[in-house]
Image (spheres, rainbow, N blue to C red):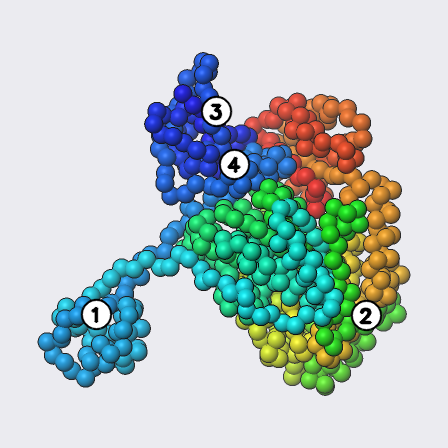
Amino acid sequence: MRIASVILPLPLPEAFDYAEPAGMALEPGDHVVVPLGPRMMAGVVAELRDGAGHNRPLKPVLERREDFRLPANTLAFIQWAARYSVDGPGQPMAIAVRGARAQKARPERLVAVTGKAPTRATPARLRVLDKAVEPMAAAALALAAEVSAAVIKGLVDDGVLEVRLVDPPTAFDEPDHARPGPVLNPSQAAAAKVMSGMVAEGGFQAALLDGVTGSGKTEVYLEAVATALAADPGAQVLILLPEIALTQGVIARFEDRFGASPAEWHSGIPAPYRRRVWEAVAGGQCRIVVGARSALFLPFKDLRLIVVDEEHDGSYKQEAGFIYHARDLAVARAKIEGAAVVLASATPSLESLWNAETGRYRWLRLAARHGASQLPDVTMIDLRENPPEPGQWLSPPLIQAMAETLERGEQSLLFLNRRGYAPLVLCRACGERMTAPDTDSWLVEHRYTGRLVCHLTGFSMPKPKACPHCGALDSLASIGPGVERVEEEARSLFPSARVAVFSSDTVFSAEAAREMVRSMSEGEIDILVATQAAAKGHDFPNLTLVGVVDADLGLRGGDLRAAERTYQLLAQASGRAGRRDRPGRALVQTYAPDHAVMEALAAQDRDAFVAAEMAEREAARLPPFGRLAAIIASGPDLAALEGYVRALAAAAPNVEGLEVYGPADAPLALIRGRRRKRFLVRADRNVDLQAFLAAWKARAKVPSSVRVTIDVDPYSFL
């Protein structure tokens, strides 16, 4: 007898053992059905071992399904990701098999000629037969022949046409790697040569493509993609993007370069397309995938290159369910696959810069913009000296610059990384702040819909007429600006201008994002008010002015990456201006123009900012010079929760080079009725942090009402 360890796509701590029935001949990666209590569950075989000497009866595997088998490297990656995140393998497995379990596309109903002559050869019928050179949908054939649906039905009834059920295509068009690309400048060509050499050489290699905004990083990594496709007829490439809004522009670049559209993978694609992509990737019939972070878990047959575009972006961090950072996992997957990985950014993360400086990654730098365009001038507007009018949010210098830009027929972008109309609603009478039920999160006013929304839990309610706390009528005041409020101000200042808002509340899908980007690119918008959805990756030819409404927003709070993220976000937003032959400028509104971030932006001296930030991190032994992890415990019963975290604190192993801070109330101490406590762990780089976390968690029994989450390398400290 052999024992099969089966990973079930559930939040379980480990794989479960089952007996392999005689003659089933299982292999790792097989899709099987097994009993789990009274239920039957589908899972994936992770391992097979000899059952000799096993003295405990095991339930047998019930069925092996033939619909898929996970490749060995994909299975190894899933198990590695679970160990790295100190989580059970079921959660990453659920991500990996989600596409295989999506609904299949229904067969298409097409009509085709049978060869039989019609009993009545009317002109309309003859036009149909003339157009029916290949199977077509009945509606399309009627349109092509300029006849009614009744004519098509009559030919079907007459036996001249027959209805066929045809499965939709599964493979994707083959990209043409020999298709010539754009002419590269010397800096681009040098970087492309190094990257192409990495791919051609084979094996695991990593590179940081560090280029200023507008330097043409996409054109450079497209050359590496072409090399990978040319080197092996089965080679596959994965391009990771942080935002759905960016996928359409990148897909268009791939279509221009290779004459074929790559596959898309993100939360906005329909289930049948998701199933088609998953099966085509597994079967080697899809060469290029452009997708969000979960695309890392696709079952690639022969993955040769991974590109992580905008690698610094915080959106690569998955904060719920299975917690992981796609940039870090992309490097791990490339190593498991023996593939090359390229991290690309105009503002790389300190972790990636440190890896490049220490020689772990090749460092490829593009110091100038492509072509005639120049980096925009960046000017700080000190709001202490140039405050907006009372009740307004745009300062006089920014308003004047917008007016001048409109007069020249150019476009402006107002950047504020805050959705909705106002981030806080409070009562003037009693001071009550509106929060979501059983949650510490403030409710954000959305004036478009007239609702108050919790962006953390999704709760929403109509804005009440009276304060729910004291009952005072018309006492609720909107505090602070969101993009909707800035749009309102822009419309009042420039009534003839065409103003639009680009945020996740106004752009709900990839199609809507494509339309918004098209409208901006073709000059149909004069002033775009946007969150970070439009602050990176987009190329708007006529955009020459960027106004940052609240540059200090990201500096508030105790986040160790606050300065780094603020610099990255503002540099990316500013970099949208002047990307063609017209000069651009960025005006940054701030109350702290002497802050290191603002001084670095104004001087466009990233290296000085990075050096100072690195020195602070090294002194505190924080990432990238040390490692962090968070343990978050939550529960509805405060007494049970406090009892558990006290027991966990007492059970912490004593390890040299490692400190444990906590337990303490989380900044958001109540979410959906569950109280939250946090530990923060700091470790030297030579400490096995994952082993410590796993051993520590096992020392204290978790009450049934308490939920424990481990976040390795946390990006959120709420």
Q: Is residue 417 left or right of residue 121?
A: right
- State how far apart marks 3 and 4 are (Cα): 20 Å
For label 4, the residue is 90
The earlier-in-sequence mark between 3 and 4 is 3
Report helix, strand or loop for mark 2: strand
- State how far apart marks 3 and 2 are (Cα): 63 Å
Category of crowding for the residue at label 2, using alpha-carbon neighbours closer than 10 angstroms: few (below 14), some (14–19), many (at least 20): many
Query: Where's the C terminus, which quadrant?
Result: top right
Report helix, strand or loop for mark 3: strand
- State how far apart marks 4 and 2 are (Cα): 48 Å
Point out which mark residue 49 bears: 3
For label 1, the residue is 113
As drawn, the residue found furthest toward the bottom would be 407
Category of crowding for the residue at label 1, using alpha-carbon neighbours closer than 10 angstroms: few (below 14), some (14–19), many (at least 20): many
Classify 698 as above or below 229: above
For label 2, the residue is 378
Category of crowding for the residue at label 3, using alpha-carbon neighbours closer than 10 angstroms: few (below 14), some (14–19), many (at least 20): few
Residue in the picture at 53% in, 54% down: 232
* Position in image of residue 674 (x %, y %): 61, 38
Q: Are marks 3 and 4 in contact (CB under 8 Å)?
A: no
Report helix, strand or loop for mark 4: helix
Mark 3 against mark 2, which lies toward the viewer?
A: 3
- Quadrant housing residue 221: bottom right
Mark 2 against mark 1, which lies toward the viewer?
A: 1
* Position in image of residue 309 (x %, y %): 65, 57
The earlier-in-sequence mark between 1 and 4 is 4
